Image (cartoon, rainbow, N blue to C red):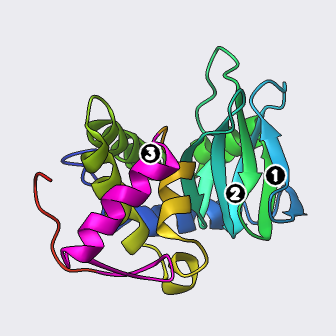
Amino acid sequence: MERTLNNLMDVDAEYAAAVERLFAAMNGIGEKRTYKNNEAFFDFKSNEQNILLIESGAFGFYRQNDRLLMQETFASAIFGLVMVSHKPEVILFAHSKLSVKVVSRDSALRIIEQEGLWHEVAIVLGKIIKVYVERDMNLIARDAYHIIKHHLYLLMSLPVEERYSTTAVKFITNRSMLSRSRVMDILKKLNDGEYILIKNGILNKIHSLPEKF
């Protein structure tokens, strides 16, 4: 049956199923690897031409020169469908125990072509585009409050065990260039004003965040 995407940016509902179909198609190939929390497992400067199927765990994209966390991704996920021509100074670190299947890019693309899975690839790439567009809209040329507001909603969206594993201050400072003192000051004011509920540094609830602060 012919399938179409009305809008590449409207991919949330189809993303999980698309990833599952791609994983299933590559079930019989590749090499399984595991990584420990905080272990680096991919450097963009390397010449590896592989696709990584992230089966379980979480990982982050870090800028090499200052270790700024640029993006965090959770399983199930596929990395490497598009290879950039230049070699960005970005390293991937595991944020938990990570289970990964490594498939040669040529083998993966051959299976995608044979199985007619370009629709699924389009959904995955559309999801990636959406994540980065939303991140840039919230972080570029915005004041400190809007950056913090964006990260509070991001933190609140995490599974409870993930959210309770880090303080709100650490979560935000690791993902932005804001100073710890600035983040702490705004969070304290939001907490005092009952816009959010933070206990022992952990974000428990967002009541209602104002548009401006």
Name the mark on residue 128: 3
**Placement of 200 over or under 68, stated as above or below:** below
Name the element at disc 3: helix
Q: Determine the residue positioned at 36% across, 43% down.
A: 135
Where does the image place residue 26, in percent across and percent down from the top left?
Answer: 71, 59
Name the element at disc 2: strand
Q: Determine the residue positioned at 79% across, 71% down.
A: 97
Query: Is residue 171 visible to the viewer in this orientation of the structure?
Result: yes
**109 falls in the magenta region:** no
Name the mark on residue 53: 2
The residue indicated by pointer 1 is: 102
Q: Distance of mark 2 from mark 3, alpha carbons?
A: 15 Å
| Mark 1 nearby-residue class (10 Å; few <14, some 14–19, many ≥20) | some
| Mark 2 nearby-residue class (10 Å; few <14, some 14–19, many ≥20) | many
* Residue 3 placement, left or right of 28: left
Amino acid type of the residue tagged 2 in the rendering? Leu
**Placement of 109 over or under 131, stated as above or below:** above
Label 1 close to label 2 by CB (< 8 Å) = yes
